[in-house]
Image: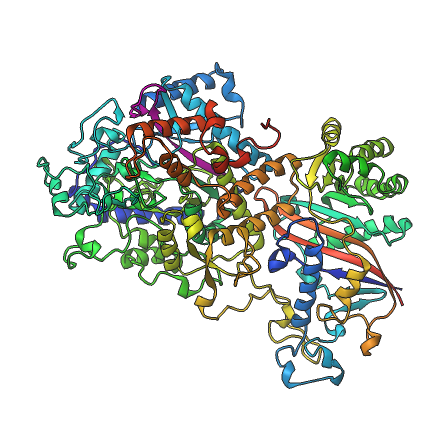
């Protein structure tokens, strides 16, 4: 079993891939992964510039420009970093106290719920290593299967009540409470909780969320019951633009596959291209943002996505 | 306006004789500031907006509207009230917003006021929400300290300034000794000695009155060629009265002849504090190409001296109104006494880039830049780098206009008065401001091109937009560089009637940085033996393609909202960039809702679904029953227009003509009642 660790590095200088299109989507994640793969393929490849004059491998007819994964990825025991991460470049320009660091963890639907505690710790560890910090200001978790969709804001709030799985979510929350108790996370938050789900949730957890991040069609139309509850409970309602199922396995296969937009890491039997084989399950995605607090400048933002490969 | 210290001002040409003296001391003061503050670091983002008002006297039933010249009385009433509130607060209402009272300042026009927030804004998103209520509070406080028939309004220019007859309260006759204008009295200017001296010395230096000529709008009944009927060719009081007989008032132009026609305009200016000098220099450069775009987008100036103009913005009129260049400097006579020909007025789009940014290519710089080589050398001898020394040596090609003899007795390096004398009379569209001496304030950049908007909602929207775009520029490391002459051209284009929808502007096609390459690739990558080069972050390769390929002509819609699929460009749009920035920040729903209404206003002004103030005013005039389609904006039209403008910030908002096409549904953003 191999753990694939996909990363975007800092996407703030990543060009047009980061500019939003209307509606919630995962384009920021997929575009910036793709662009980081390409960048690494060029950057780590010793002969990318003289490629045309030195065809090294006749099998690469389909994608002559693509260097072998071994050049730009790294395997460490069971971890497979796509691309290689140069940790000497990690860290922030100023002292950690100057930043507001927000982390959003997406538990993906295919992962085993029992593993969420481990996933949460792994995600935080990667982010803290990347940013060179020992704590973050806010950790928001996004559970699968939740949304704010409906004909009107009341309808969306109602529908939300029946989404997700209360028991599983409360159980998973314990892992966050633990991080909170350790001081690794200063504030906890949820995503996409409507008024009814939120009020049930609040009754069952020890460390209460301080933030509920919602994606409503028009940010001016927050369901009134949610607005009231948030006010009463002192929970801040934040806006976001992410979709909940941020990395479906089909998308992941495409990202890593041999297609023209892929990274060329997975094998493709049809064309006889060698690579990693097996069943691929996306487990979680984490997004991190480091903002220089009193200047409103985003210094570092990126994603890690982790998938399990059963070979 | 800058410092208002009192003293004995030198008339021209006495001031001319001490110009070098002032410049030399100014350079020493600048070097002192620079040496002290060049290492200043980690300043927070603080920013402030400046809103300028005209004060009119208006009554519903009385056709005559006038400008009130009671600036001093109003400021006095405000000052007394502020003292009262400091002493214990008898005016509890005033404590509502932001904790600090707004500050009111005098301006050049005696019919003007300027108001700024009591303390600078930060980048907390809650602060952004306080801007509009604070602007409303400023207007309210100002109104409360005026006579019942007086109103502070935010039109860029007063449509009847300089019309024959009475347009001020109280009335003064024109043709005073200081301005020598045949249209406006000397009393139109703030009586503080600095202002009449400024006007008189600009006139003396030029050798003529200033000439502010605006093309008239040709309507179906406008006689053609059109001769400004208000020009008097038979005045013989001052030598300058000859100007109009010597062609100062050409056909088809509205002719104006005094500083008040320009400096009596109201603007919306935003000043930012940068983290350090490096960030300040970067912001200065990156904001420069945005200037003409925001000028066209905020267009609000279609009327001068009672006539519809064929231009939409104020900029060139202010530029002409303070143009002190001599005939030699203008290129009308061969150079004899003056040192160089100068292509631009002191009030003009800026001519330098100053950032030590590897992306700044030599080709972007102004090939016609005039620099005082001695000043530049002195600054460089003092340790300043060539790029920044060039900038200040360019500003210092001008003469100081107002010099107080007392200030020439002793050089005080703890002050910056001589430096500021030149710096603050170079009115370029972006201003780079060194830290003031004796304060903790950092390096600042001022964004100056925007026209003031009629409502506080619009003024807040544009202020907040500029703040957010600076944050996006810094976060995404955006690159808007185009050659400076292209920005000059854009500035001219921005003047055209309805340029916001009808014209195209040079803009950089790809604003994104080149991604930093992997460290290993810096020297050709990982060698076959596996040794790597040290992990030092290398600069992206310097771009070397033709500069002409980097920019294209784009509409304001394309620049603000992004290229359409059928466009040859793939520009992302400034508003989508700002939205991407906001998506990455923790913003609460209420704030985001309000910011969305601001961005929506700007988006719709850019794509034409909402009108600029200029268009709204033109339509107001065009559809008025008294308008004869002859370009003349008569007294009743002016009265009703001012009434509507007052109404937009008061009770009559909903009744104002075409308000929905001008402000859309936004004048009462979400959360409020809607009808």
What residue is shown at x 65% (from left), y 72% (from top)?
Answer: A42
Counting from the top left corner in percent of width and height, residue B586 is at 66, 42
Q: Is B132 included in the stretch rendered in magenta? A: no
Work out whether B176 lies above or below B449: above
Residue B171: percent from the left, percent from the top?
22, 23
Residue occupying image coordinates x 57% and y 64%: B514
Q: Nearer the viewer, residue B23 or B151?
A: B151
Number of marks present in the image shown: 0
Q: Quadrant of residue B587?
A: top right
Looking at the image, is B38 positioned above or below residue A153?
Answer: below
| Outermost residue toward the left in this view | B236
* Of B402 and B419, the residue lying toward us: B402
Question: Which residue appears farthest toward the top when viewing the image?
Answer: B90
Depth check: give the residue in front, B254 or A1: B254
Give the magenta part as a residue range: B47-71
- In x, y percent, where is residue B221? 27, 41
Left or right: A164 in relation to B214 = right
């Amino acid at each position: 079993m191999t753990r694939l660790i996909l990363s975007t590095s800092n996407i703030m200088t990543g060009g047009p891939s980061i500019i939003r299109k209307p509606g919630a989507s995962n384009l920021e994640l997929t575009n910036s992964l793709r662009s980081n793969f390409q960048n690494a393929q060029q950057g780590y490849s010793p002969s990318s510039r003289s490629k045309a004059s030195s065809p090294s491998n006749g099998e690469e007819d389909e994608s002559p420009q693509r260097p072998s994964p071994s050049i730009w990825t790294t395997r460490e025991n069971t971890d497979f970093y796509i691309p290689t991460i140069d940790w000497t470049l990690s860290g922030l320009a100023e002292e950690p106290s100057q930043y507001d660091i927000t982390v959003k963890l997406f538990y993906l639907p295919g992962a085993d719920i029992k593993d969420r505690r481990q996933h949460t710790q792994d995600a935080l560890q990667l982010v803290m290593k990347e940013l060179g910090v020992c704590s973050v200001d806010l950790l928001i978790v996004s559970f699968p299967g939740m949304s704010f969709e409906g004909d009107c804001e009341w309808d969306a709030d109602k529908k939300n009540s029946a989404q997700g799985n209360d028991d599983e979510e409360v159980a998973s929350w314990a892992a966050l409470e633990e991080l909170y108790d350790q001081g690794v996370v200063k504030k906890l938050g949820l995503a996409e909780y409507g008024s009814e789900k939120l009020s049930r949730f609040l009754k069952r957890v020890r460390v209460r969320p301080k933030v509920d991040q919602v994606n409503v069609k028009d940010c001016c139309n927050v369901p009134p019951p949610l607005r009231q509850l948030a006010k009463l409970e002192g929970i801040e309602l934040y806006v976001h633009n992410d979709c909940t199922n941020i990395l479906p396995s089909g998308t992941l296969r495409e990202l890593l596959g041999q297609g023209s937009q892929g990274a060329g890491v997975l094998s493709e039997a049809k064309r006889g291209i060698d690579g990693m084989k097996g069943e691929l399950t996306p487990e979680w995605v984490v997004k991190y943002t480091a903002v220089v607090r009193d200047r409103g400048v985003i210094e570092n933002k990126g994603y890690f996505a982790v998938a399990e490969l059963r070979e | 306006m800058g410092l208002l210290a009192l003293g004995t001002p030198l008339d021209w040409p006495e001031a001319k004789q001490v110009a070098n003296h002032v410049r030399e001391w100014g350079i020493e003061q600048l070097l002192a500031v620079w040496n002290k503050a060049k290492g200043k670091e980690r300043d927070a983002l603080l920013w402030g907006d400046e809103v300028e008002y005209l004060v009119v006297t208006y009554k519903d039933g009385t056709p005559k509207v006038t400008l009130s010249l009671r600036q001093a009385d109003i400021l006095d009433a405000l000052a007394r009230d502020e003292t009262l509130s400091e002493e214990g607060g008898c005016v509890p209402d005033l404590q509502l917003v932001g904790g600090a009272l707004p500050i009111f300042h005098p301006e050049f026009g005696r019919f003007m006021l300027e108001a700024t927030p009591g303390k600078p804004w930060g980048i907390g998103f809650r602060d952004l929400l306080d801007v509009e209520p604070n602007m409303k509070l400023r207007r309210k406080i100002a109104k409360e300290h005026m006579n019942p028939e007086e109103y502070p309004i935010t039109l860029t220019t007063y449509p009847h300034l300089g019309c024959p007859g009475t347009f001020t309260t109280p009335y003064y006759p024109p043709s005073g000794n200081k301005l020598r204008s045949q249209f406006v009295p000397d009393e139109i200017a703030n009586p503080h000695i600095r202002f009449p001296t400024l006007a008189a010395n600009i006139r003396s230096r030029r050798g003529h009155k200033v000439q502010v000529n605006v093309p008239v709008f040709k309507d179906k009944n406008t006689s053609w060629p059109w001769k400004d009927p208000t020009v008097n060719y038979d005045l013989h009081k001052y030598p300058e009265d000859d100007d109009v007989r010597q062609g100062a008032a050409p056909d088809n132009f509205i002719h104006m002849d005094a500083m008040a026609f320009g400096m009596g305009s109201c603007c919306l200016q935003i000043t930012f504090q940068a983290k350090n000098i490096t960030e300040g220099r970067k912001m200065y450069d990156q904001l420069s190409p945005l200037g003409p775009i925001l000028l066209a987008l905020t267009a609000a100036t279609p009327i001068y001296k009672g006539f519809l103009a064929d231009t939409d913005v104020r900029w060139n009129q202010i530029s002409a109104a303070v143009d002190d260049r001599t005939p030699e400097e203008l290129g009308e006579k061969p150079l004899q006494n003056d040192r160089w020909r100068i292509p631009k007025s002191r009030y003009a789009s800026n001519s330098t880039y100053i950032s030590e940014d590897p992306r700044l290519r030599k080709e972007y710089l102004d090939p016609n830049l005039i620099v005082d080589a001695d000043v530049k050398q002195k600054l460089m001898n003092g340790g300043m780098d060539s790029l920044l020394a060039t900038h200040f040596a360019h500003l210092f090609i001008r003469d100081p206009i107002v010099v107080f003899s007392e200030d020439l007795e002793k050089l005080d390096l703890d002050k910056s008065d001589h430096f500021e004398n030149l710096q603050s009379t170079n009115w370029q569209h972006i201003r780079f401001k060194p830290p003031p001496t004796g304060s903790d304030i950092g390096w600042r950049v001022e964004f100056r091109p925007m026209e003031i908007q009629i409502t506080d909602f619009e003024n807040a929207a544009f202020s907040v937009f500029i703040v957010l775009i600076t944050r996006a520029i810094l976060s995404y490391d955006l690159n808007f560089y185009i050659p400076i002459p292209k920005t000059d051209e854009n500035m001219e284009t921005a003047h055209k009637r309805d340029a916001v929808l009808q014209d195209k502007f040079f803009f950089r096609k790809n604003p994104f940085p080149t991604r930093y390459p992997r460290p290993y690739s810096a020297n050709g990558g990982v060698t076959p033996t596996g040794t790597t080069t040290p992990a030092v972050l290398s600069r992206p390769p310097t771009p070397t393609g033709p500069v002409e390929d980097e920019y294209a002509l784009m509409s304001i819609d394309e620049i603000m909202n992004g290229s359409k699929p059928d466009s040859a460009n793939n520009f992302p749009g400034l508003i989508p960039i700002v939205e991407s920035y906001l998506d990455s920040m923790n913003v609460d729903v209420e704030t985001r809702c309000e910011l969305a209404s601001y961005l929506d206003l700007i988006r719709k002004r850019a794509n034409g679904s909402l009108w600029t103030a200029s268009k709204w005013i033109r339509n107001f005039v065009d559809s008025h029953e008294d308008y004869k389609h002859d370009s003349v904006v008569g007294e009743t039209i002016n009265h009703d227009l001012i009434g509507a403008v007052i109404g937009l910030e008061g009770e009559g908002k909903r009744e104002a003509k075409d308000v929905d096409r001008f402000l859309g549904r936004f004048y009462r953003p979400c959360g409020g009642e809607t009808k």
